[in-house]
Amino acid sequence: MSTSLIERYRAHLPVTDATPIVSIGEGGTPLVELPKLSERLGLEIYAKFEGMNPTGSFKDRGMTLALSKAAEDGAEAVICASTGNTSASAAAYATRAGMRCVVLIPDGKIALGKLAQALAHGARVIAIDGSFDDALRIVRELVDRTPIALVNSLNPFRLEGQKTGAFEVCDVLGDAPDALCIPVGNAGNVSAYFMGFSEYLEAGTSSRMPRLYGFQAAGSAPLVDGHTIEKPETIATAIRIGNPARGQQALDAMNSTGGRVAAVTDEDILAAYALVASTEGVFCEPSSAASIAGVIAARERGDLKEGERVVCVLTGHGLKDPDTAIAESPDMLHLPAEYGPIEKAIIA
Ligand code: F0G
């Protein structure tokens, strides 16, 4: 049986013997070397492959803690606004905890796999004619007026759980890396990594704070542009967010480490997405590839020096978004069930 993330890092987490642990075997995701990209950029690059969590994204780290604490409080239902992954994770962990789950999503703007997950786990899925930011505004009002528990990353337990990603990186490498590249949407995860790295540094478990580089999609880059984006747009739907709830916290965190926030274009995101899939054998979703597009841009800009050790967080699995995968890949061949044409197609 796999140990739950909460058990593994219990000493660092706000749980007690009275906390019922809601777990589906999250965490312990692989740190995969990216040799081709490392050689090309003159860096030592690793991917923290968060797509290997039970629902296929990093959200499970936060959700195990959020649902455990909700269960401790006697909650009967949870709610979130989501660009997809949070809804999939909340639906799975709520099911596990025996709670009802309601999710608000921007209609037509979430990847197919994520929608399939939320529905399969029996969540009440409400697609609104608006953005993620609209959905979050309504959800915040709902939790003020009803006894439903909020499981967006505004919930502090989400960040407490997600900070374990930083612990695992340090535990596997033996110390913190020089830099971390990470996609930024609602700005919870980069804030959580900062918490994790800070705690290990204070405890003397690691010796340095990595420079944190966060990447937003150019059409949805409120932290780079310095203002709310009313109509965010990007192919990377998971980070299609114009008013990040933890924006200031994330900016302060990145700046304090000597890192920064930057934007990457959809074109660069898609190129990076295809690159890791086709040259490294690692399949992440488009939003996750913002960290790969980001490491390339950061190296070009001189933010990353020769030989530095860099971790790119690949936040979600490529299987989440089959539509983009198929649209961005070469076509398959359709042939009759006969030897001749098949041999010809292979040898040609
Ligand atoms: N990558 C993926 C795959 C995501 O799903 C998200 C956020 C992010 C990166 C950005 O993380 O919001 O903590 O800065 N997805 C949320 C959701 C918003 O609803 O699934 P963040």
Image (cartoon, rainbow, N blue to C red):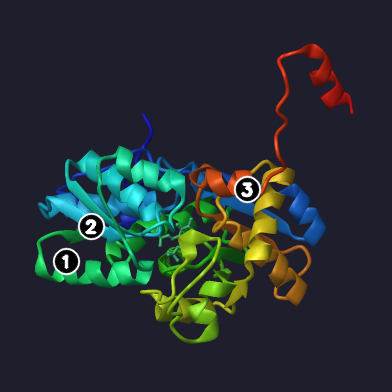
Q: Which mark is residue 143?
A: 1
Using the image as rendered, state which of residue 281 and residue 1 is in the foreground: 281
Outermost residue toward the top in this view: 339
Please indicate whether residue 113 sits to the left or right of residue 133 in the image: right
Using the image as rendered, state which of residue 219 and residue 59 is in the foreground: 219
Residue 272, image quadrant:
bottom right
- Mark 1 crowd level (few <14, some 14–19, many ≥20, 10 Å Cα): some
Residue at numbered disc 3: 327
SS class of the residue under badge 3? helix
Using the image as rendered, state which of residue 32 and residue 245 is in the foreground: 245
Residue at the spot x=59%, y=64% of the render? 181
Quadrant that contains the C terminus:
top right
Residue 283 place in picture, x, y as percent: 60, 44
Q: Is residue 256 above or below residue 20?
A: below
Q: Earlier in the sequence, mark 1 or mark 2?
A: 2
Q: Nearer the viewer, mark 2 or mark 3?
A: 3
Residue 315 place in picture, x, y as percent: 51, 54
- Mark 2 crowd level (few <14, some 14–19, many ≥20, 10 Å Cα): many
